Image (cartoon, rainbow, N blue to C red):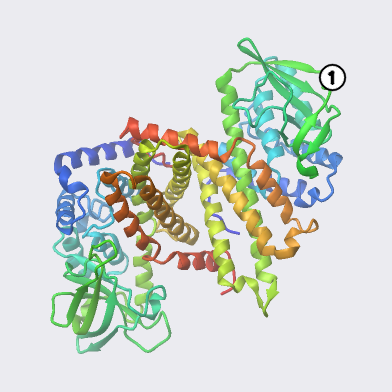
Amino acid sequence: MADIAKDDELRRHVRDWLTDNIPPDLRRSRTYEDRLAVDRLLGEGGWLGYTWPTEFGGRGGTPREAIIVDDELARGGISAAGSPSRQGFRHLGPTLLVHGKDGQRQEFLPRIRNLSDIWCQGFSEPGAGSDLASVSTRAELVGDVFRLNGSKIWTTHAQYANWCYVLARTAPGPRHHNLTFLMVPMHQPGITVRPIKQLAGGTEFNEVWFDDAETSADNVIGELNDGWSIAVTTLSTERGFNLISHYRGYLEELGQMASRASAETDLIAIGDLYAQLLGIEAISARIMQALETSMLNDTALASGGKLVNTEFHQRMTEIALGLSVNSPGLAGEAFITFLEARAETIYGGTSQIQRNILAERVLGLPR
Amino acid sequence: MYEPSFPLPDGEQEIADAASASFERLFPVSRLAEPDPGANRAAWQEAGAEGWTYCAVADDKAEAVSLPTVLAVAHAAGQQLLVDEFTNNLVLLPGVLQRISDPDQRAHWRARHEQRNPGYLLCDGRLASLTSDSLSVPWVYGVSDGFDIYQIQSEDDRYVLLRWCAPEVQYEPVGGLALGVGTATTDLGDVEQAKLSCGPADLAKIALRAQLVHSAGLTGVSAEALDRTIKYLQTREQFGVVIGKFQSLKHLVADAYALGMTAWLAVQHAAAADSQRESRLRAARILAREASMTASKLAMQLHGGIGFTWEESIHYFLKTAALSGYRFGSPEDDRLRLAKALAELDLQTRGVPVTAGGA
């Protein structure tokens, strides 16, 4: 059973620290520069990589404590989405902790923590979205370097990143046994990045081309041709935490909608959303409990949680837009949020893929 | 069918498993095909003899099992479509009978309820409290011939429990379908009385507990309807393949499953909540009702024509979900109250409580 008093103490500590250290105008800013400034401050304060061992600059915190920190950051207007440090400390860092060699951990983890390195994720390709294992970017070992050719897409923050972790094909063998997980420096002649303008005007995503780009053979995480199992670890770090870290922000948005609404039909719609959100809170609580002892390995919770959470948020943004159309001060923000939420049921495994996973792997329906 | 759950307190999983197995054995869904009031009463007598009827009520002899365990058993009973009778006889009546002031009378009344005659309370659903000054209740849940009828009345600041022992009841089930939900009328002669030593807060607590247990039952209805549907999809062939291969059907099932999982976790989480408990209970009720309706409607649709027949049991799931789902109020009212509670929370706030109600 968790120690509630200790939880509260940590919450107060984070809140006080935020009040003293993060200027209010930076908190809800959407610009990359502002988010980077916030991440640097958080890094200096020791809030990034909270669960990492102290030898790598972390605090050795428990997953529960990390969730409380996330929750308080979201409450303070700093959401996990859009954070420049996210790929590094949320995804690659935990992957290195599980699969990295000692030298790789010593070299890369401190640089993730102090934001010397900004990472991006080179997984999706034009021909490999939902079917990630079919990536066709090739990496050929020539002497002691890998030479990469191919392209990646939807690569968040690639235009700012100086490193990319890449899933590349290194053998002709069967699916899932022909891929290698590589760390690749971005600033080299063989890499071209093209920002993709998205429907809401932002350019968070990019297309990345590798034309004889190189990386040292020392930069393989795990074994050659065993990259799929490493990628599965990386993907699993996205689950659970993402769900929980969004909950607080959604609750506050919905609370403001409820305060502004007066028509009974609007209130009924908001009440329904609140019921769904309290359901998501329950899923989060169960995930939090699971994370106390290990990484999340419950497929029903991971896929069901992702499905329920993203579908909920899209519905919420749609209703928020409907409620804001006659309020010029609110409509712009609501419209942008509504548009941006469209991506949530696509990235990180589409809703359709989550449904396939639930139906086939959890419920046993035939492929 | 696997469903994520919160772990039960130490040592209680075995109790939950044993109780669930008993209710499954004593109350199979097949009992609904040809209702037999005598057999039904005998099943309850056996549940009482095995110690389940009062397992949630602490007394001199035994510690009560925890609420999460009762919810787990209610979920299993719900899979047998034992939702309203279960709520009445494991939560409402034991909760109220345990508050009879006179120890001898309490023991006597409890013994009858536990060993001989299950029952139901006349006012427990649409009314905000368990009490009523009137006996003209148009809608009762968990009715079966030979059950005792109870009613709580307030006299000044005190409560009195009335009991009619197995009165003759003219029972008109909704739509003429025997599911234990409908209008009951009786001349209600030979009433007995017992003084209760409890206040409105105690009764409200029993009512809230009953609502949560009832919601757990509805999530059981949802789980079983879905489980039967999955088994059907795994065996039924059309176009030369089992129809469970069709992605359109898989996705419908996956959505219903995700909703059922959310509802079941919400029910369990509401039991553990220490803040905004009423909102969490209301949310659990909304989700449980929605999950049971969604799964049972889907079960009927995906079973095709056979699901629409009396001989296939799917119709009992739909009927139970549709009727029991309204037992403790309308969905619209729940949603409206939730929104108002949220607005209040927002305004108080940044009053979001410091602890986020973890398990």
Callout 1 secondary element = loop
* Residue B66: percent from left, percent from top: 57, 36
Q: Relative to A135, does residue A360 appear above or below in the rendering? A: above
Can you tell which quarter of the image residue B357 is in? top left
Q: Nearer the viewer, residue B63 or A188?
A: A188
Query: Which quadrant is home to the C terminus of chain A?
Result: bottom right
Measuring 34% from the left and 30% from the top, which residue is drawn there?
A: B348
Q: Relative to A296, does residue B109 appear above or below in the rendering? A: above
- Residue lying farthest to the top in this orientation: B156
Is residue A230 visible in the rendered image? The answer is: yes
* Residue B151: percent from left, percent from top: 72, 23
Measuring 39% from the left and 49% from the top, which residue is drawn there?
A: A322
The subunit letter for the residue under badge 1 reads B
Can you tell which quarter of the image residue A359 is in? bottom right
Instruction: Indicate left or right for A255 with A16 as reference.
Output: right
Mark 1, Cα crowd under 10 Å, few <14 / some 14-19 / many 20+, is few
* Residue B243: percent from left, percent from top: 64, 72
